[in-house]
Image (tube, rainbow, N blue to C red):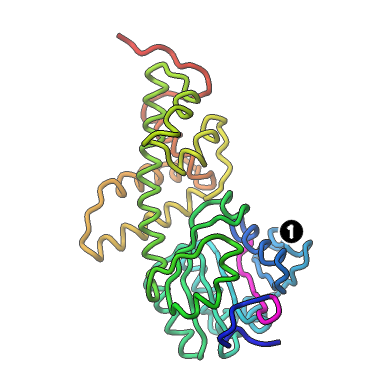
């Protein structure tokens, strides 16, 4: 089988795909590649999470190294930078150790820009390539193939991978190695402060005696409308805190943001406030809920509970 190291764009006839990480996001993203006819080998520490992909034709590898030895392009989307380092850079079991010259690693985990640069340098030393390509859009975007993808690295390699990226969403080339991660972190800062505004607005509307559902419908087409409102507003009202994106992972992302801000000498107080509110959820044992669970922190601060009914009238 031909290798994607050629100048040809990736296609099912010339590119074997490896996929590491089949959780909430990765499972749906990988399924798009399988449905498009790509030969895909998967690895996940918890086998049951990979089973839906095996059921539609994926092959199973017993290690990232074994997976990479059967692949031209290896995608990863795991939880934490330490996971990225283990599955990709471990000297004996990591994917890079099994990848042939000309192979490509695409890390879609939200991770540290410095780790993306380290991965790129390690790949180059083996005559391979590495792209950092974290995503935004949550579980809904993963399922519908409408994710925003932030790519950093060699632009010509990103262009070769465009047919693969197009099955998952819209790729945006952000610059050299690490720039995809920087863009995703800026994205997370924007989301974090937007979520604070959303839940504060909902708590205020509730306390003011408004029907919060009617309120959200009213603002959705105005200047306060947002993707966060569209994705999470109705879920919050239904007390649906199932994760499209885990609080634990968002706390990790915001922690990386704060670390990078410190490195830059940058003060972002809105980010710091949002991180503290999300950290309070984790302290209450709610880290495995979705990010829309931020409403719980505001409810506790104000001793209120939202529902879809009209709240009591405000005091005079």
**Based on the displayed image, in which of its 4 quarters is residue 234 positioned?**
top right
- Residue 281 appears at what percent x and percent y? 44, 42
Tell me where the magenta segment starts and ends, as one range. 12-22
* Image location (x, y in percent) of residue 73: 60, 78
Front one among 18 and 66: 18
Identify which residue is drawn at 63% across, 70% down: 19
Note whether 70 is above or below 288 in the view shown.
below
Q: Is residue 119 visible?
A: no
Q: Residue at x 42, y 30 (%)?
A: 219
x, y percent for residue 4: 60, 83
Q: Which residue is mark 1?
A: 52
Q: Residue at 46% of width from left, 62% of height from top?
A: 110
State left or right for residue 105 relative to residue 255.
right
Residue 162 magenta: no
Q: On the rendered image, what quadrant is the N terminus found in?
A: bottom right
- 84 above or below 189? below
- Tell me which corner region of the image, top left, top right, bottom left or bottom right, holds residue 95: bottom right
The residue closer to the viewer here, 173 or 246, is: 173
Report the quarter where the C terminus lies. top left
Visible in this render: residue 303?
A: yes
Depicted 267 relative to depicted 208: above or below: below
Q: Position of residue 81 (x, y in %)?
A: 46, 67
Extreme residue in the top direction: 316
Label 1 CA crowd tier, 10 Å (few <14, some 14–19, many 20+) = some
Q: Secondary structure at mark 1?
A: helix
1 vs 162: above or below: below
């Amino acid at each position: 089988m031909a290798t994607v190291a050629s100048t040809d764009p990736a296609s099912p006839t010339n590119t074997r795909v490896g996929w590491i990480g089949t959780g909430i996001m990765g499972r749906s993203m990988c399924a798009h590649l399988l449905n498009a006819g790509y030969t895909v080998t998967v690895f996940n520490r918890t086998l049951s999470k990979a089973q839906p992909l095996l059921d539609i034709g994926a092959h199973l590898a017993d290690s990232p190294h074994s997976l990479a030895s059967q692949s031209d392009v290896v995608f990863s989307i795991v939880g934490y930078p330490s996971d990225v380092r283990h599955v990709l850079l471990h000297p004996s079991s990591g994917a890079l150790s099994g990848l042939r010259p000309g192979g490509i690693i695409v890390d879609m985990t939200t991770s540290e820009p410095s780790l993306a640069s380290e991965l790129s340098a390690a790949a180059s030393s083996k005559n391979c390539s590495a792209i950092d390509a974290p995503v935004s859009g949550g579980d809904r975007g993963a399922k519908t193939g409408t994710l925003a993808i932030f790519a950093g690295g060699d632009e010509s390699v990103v262009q070769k991978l465009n047919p693969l990226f197009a099955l998952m969403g819209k790729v945006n080339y952000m610059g050299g190695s690490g720039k995809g991660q920087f863009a995703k972190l800026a994205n997370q800062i924007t989301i974090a402060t937007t979520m604070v505004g959303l839940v504060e607005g909902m708590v205020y509307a509730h306390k003011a005696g408004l029907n919060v559902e009617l309120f959200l419908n009213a603002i959705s087409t105005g200047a306060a409308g947002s993707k966060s409102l569209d994705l999470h507003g109705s879920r919050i009202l239904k007390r649906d805190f199932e994760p499209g994106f885990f609080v634990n992972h968002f706390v990790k992302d915001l922690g990386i943001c704060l670390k990078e801000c410190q490195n830059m000498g940058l003060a972002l107080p809105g980010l710091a406030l949002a991180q503290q509110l999300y950290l309070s959820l984790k302290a209450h044992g709610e880290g495995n809920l979705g990010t829309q669970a931020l409403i719980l922190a505001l409810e506790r601060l104000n001793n209120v509970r939202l529902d879809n009914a009209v709240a009591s009238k405000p005091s005079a």
